[in-house]
């Protein structure tokens, strides 16, 4: 149990870093006239690469060099979880009447789903 708690703590730290990477790149490129839609693609891509590298080393203690198949599984889980997040958001935003509360709850659900997916599907623990 202590191992899962430690892993989840690192997972939260890495996720915050990924959020900063995504937001920073997206805002920077949007300011360079990429537009919010176009700027999000490199922001999200770089955030997925960052979180894969950081989670494999810090969260799941992988020291050996990463493999392309592992990265593809990671990206698959990340994109699946993004769809879960968006779906939960859409289901809740109307009934709750609060965009912020819908985002918070959707993020909580997707955070648990992504941790489980990365832990079980990507890093096989």
Image: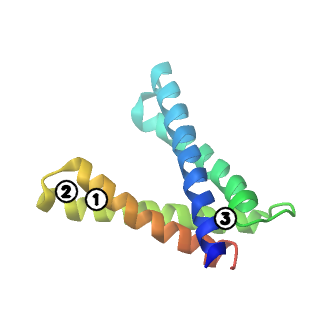
Q: Earlier in the sequence, mark 2 or mark 3?
A: 3
The residue sitting at 53% across, 32% down in the picture is 24
Mark 1 — residue?
Answer: 89
Does residue 55 appear to the left or right of 23 in the view shown?
A: right
Mark 1 closeness class: few <14, some 14–19, many ≥20 residues within 10 Å: many
Examine the image and state in which quarter residue 74 appears: bottom right
Task: Name the mark on residue 93.
Answer: 2
Does residue 81 appear to the left or right of 95 in the view shown?
A: right
Task: Name the mark on residue 6.
Answer: none
Mark 2 closeness class: few <14, some 14–19, many ≥20 residues within 10 Å: some
Q: Residue furthest front?
A: 2
How far, Cα to Cα, is label 2 from label 3?
Answer: 31 Å
Q: Earlier in the sequence, mark 3 or mark 1?
A: 3
Residue at disc 3, secondary structure: helix
Where is residue 30? Give x, y as percent: 46, 26
Q: Badges 2 and 1: C-beta atoms under 8 Å apart? A: yes
Task: Name the mark on residue 72.
Answer: 3
Where is residue 8? Give x, y as percent: 57, 65
**Closer to us: mark 2 or mark 3?**
2
How far, Cα to Cα, is label 3 from label 1?
Answer: 26 Å
How far, Cα to Cα, is label 2 from label 1?
Answer: 6 Å
Residue at disc 1, secondary structure: helix
* Quadrant of the image containing the C terminus: bottom right
Residue at disc 2, secondary structure: helix
């Amino acid at each position: 149990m202590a191992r899962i708690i430690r892993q989840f703590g690192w997972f939260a730290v890495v996720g915050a870093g990924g959020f900063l990477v995504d937001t920073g790149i997206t805002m920077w490129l949007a300011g360079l006239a990429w537009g919010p839609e176009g700027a999000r693609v490199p922001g999200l891509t770089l955030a997925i690469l960052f979180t894969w590298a950081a989670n494999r080393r810090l969260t799941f203690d992988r020291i050996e060099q990463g493999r392309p198949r592992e990265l593809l599984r990671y990206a698959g889980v990340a994109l699946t979880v993004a769809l879960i997040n968006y779906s939960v958001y859409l289901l809740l935003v109307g009934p709750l009447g609060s965009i912020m509360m819908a985002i918070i709850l959707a993020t909580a659900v997707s955070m648990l789903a992504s941790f489980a997916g990365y832990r079980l599907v990507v890093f096989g623990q």
